[in-house]
Amino acid sequence: MDNKDQSENHSYELATFAGGCFWCMVTPFEEFPGIHGIVSGYMGGLTDNPTYEQVKQGDTGHAEVVQITFDPDVFPYEKLLELYWVQIDPTDAGGQFHDRGSSYRTVIFYHHEEQRMLAERSKQALEAGGQFNKPIVTEIVPASTFYPAEEYHQDYHRKHPKHYKEDREQSGRDEFIRKHWEK
């Protein structure tokens, strides 16, 4: 993955998604051309500089997120949205898979009006597609201050591959993806 400084190319944009455990939200996005960085962190709450333990307890209002630096000319935001939806259960307002609570809710945090419109359109298409028999509850809200997670959470799947794989398998995420998204 190319981790060039965002200032080197002004065409880079940010996309921020909450989809449950941020460890599991990194790998689906990282290997594509046009993706120049993914940082795990926190967004959407009221506490400044929250810690993982604070966010996990659910008292901060933040969600675990991934913030993606991407080149929209190479990998458009619409493709990021397509990848995002198939990583989550968009009908579950109480968390994602075995991770429960508001810090594991699903949210698309938009960084400008075009992202908001594209996110709303993709959500409407998902609702109209009839794939789920429950309402799509994923929020679409303005991005707020992003707080990077502690260093040990960054690239967790590479630093602790055995634990990451076990945790992901036990979470129920992959089973859900196979059942609902892989047709």
Image (spheres, rainbow, N blue to C red):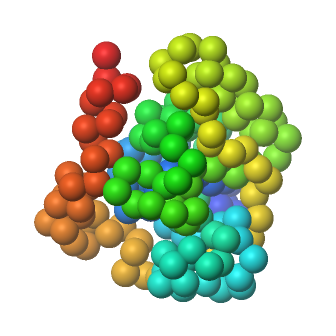
Task: Choose between 129 and 149: the one closer to the eye.
Answer: 129
Position of residue 84 relative to residue 55, above or below, is: above
Q: Position of residue 119 (x, y in %)?
A: 70, 34
From the image, which quarter does the N terminus lie in?
bottom left
Q: Quadrant of residue 123?
A: top right
Q: Residue at x 68, y 45 (%)?
A: 139
Is 43 left or right of 169, judged from the image as shown?
A: right
In terms of image quadrants, where is residue 2?
Answer: bottom left
Residue 165 appears in the rendering: yes
Q: Is residue 148 visible?
A: no
Q: Position of residue 22 (x, y in %)?
A: 44, 61
In depth, the one of 58 and 146 nearer the eye is 58
| Along the viewing direction, whichever of 133 and 34 lies nearer the viewer | 133
166 w.r.t. 56: above or below: above
Give whichever of 121, 132 is nearer the camera: 132
Vertical order, 128 against 21 (above or below): above
Figure disc tally: 0
Q: Position of residue 24 (x, y in %)?
A: 37, 55
